[in-house]
Image: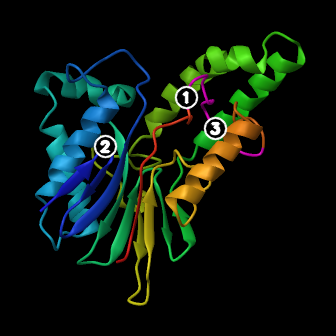
Amino acid sequence: MAESEDGIIATDDFIAVIDGSTSKTNLCLHPGTTNGRYCMTLIKQYISQAARDLSCENFCRGVTAFVRSHYDSNQLTRLAEHPEERATASCAVYSDTRREVWLVGDCQCLVDGTLHDNPKPAEAAIARKRAAFARQLLDTNAATMESLRQNDTTRTLITKDLIESMAGQNVEYAVVDGFDIPQDKVRIIAVGESASEIVLASDGYPLLMPTLEASEQALQAQMATDPLNIGRFKATKAFLAGNNSFDDRSYIRFEP
């Protein structure tokens, strides 16, 4: 039996949080949905029918083949050369049989309060670059905090960097995108028999806490103190005006 919400799936054998990547180009692989959301949907479909004793390595192979099977065969050559155009997502998957959490991409988890994550290697440097752009605009009065929240031109300034960094997709870091996942870039967290609580979440929470309420409070505190995300916490996106977050977020807490 499977239960599913946006970005979350729970079966008798697996619990997962899945975070579709923000599109960097205008190419749409599936009508009516973004490429990241499309990949998220495919991963959920795969997990819903996955064998209970699946290993992390076999999960990576199987979900890769499943996503790849949904590409138009005529697109594969181009997608091999342009990873920014692929259907892409990160996921944190708990296997109840294996008592392991698998971090494929930049999701995160808490096991009895201990944080585990798997960030993209270039993300921090690009976020610092965006923060420097924003500071320059603010210091020279070329923009205000309000104008950047309405139209985050700093995001536009780093789009090329984000696309270039995606050349490292499934080379320097792992994602699910229909192309081979390097196992050494996937984090496997063993869950001991004494573990009492696990939290899986997307990277939309800058400070992951043991409860959803506390994680949401930390997110709102970040928005109140630094809505552009250019201070102590730096991101490649701001809290745009009218939004209560800077990125999609999913969170689930459970007892293993």
Using residue 24 as the reference point, say whether residue 48 is left or right of it: left
Q: Which residue is mark 2?
A: 6
Q: Which residue is mark 1?
A: 243
Q: Position of residue 4 (x, y in %)?
A: 23, 51
**Quarter of the image that includes the N terminus:** bottom left
Magenta stretch contains residue 239 = yes
| Earlier-in-chain disc, 2 versus 1 | 2
Q: Earlier in the sequence, mark 1 or mark 3?
A: 3
Q: Is residue 212 left or right of residue 147?
A: left
Amino acid at pointer 3:
Ala
Residue drawn at 74 percent across, 35 percent down? 230
For the view shown, which residue lies furthest in the front direction? Answer: 213
The label on residue 199 is none
Query: 149 and 193: which one is in front?
Result: 149
Q: Nearer the viewer, residue 181 or 26?
A: 26
Residue identifier under label 3: 235
Q: How far apart in space, not on screen, are marks 3 and 2 (Cα)? A: 23 Å
Q: Amino acid at mark 1?
A: Asn
45 or 128: which is nearer to us? Answer: 45
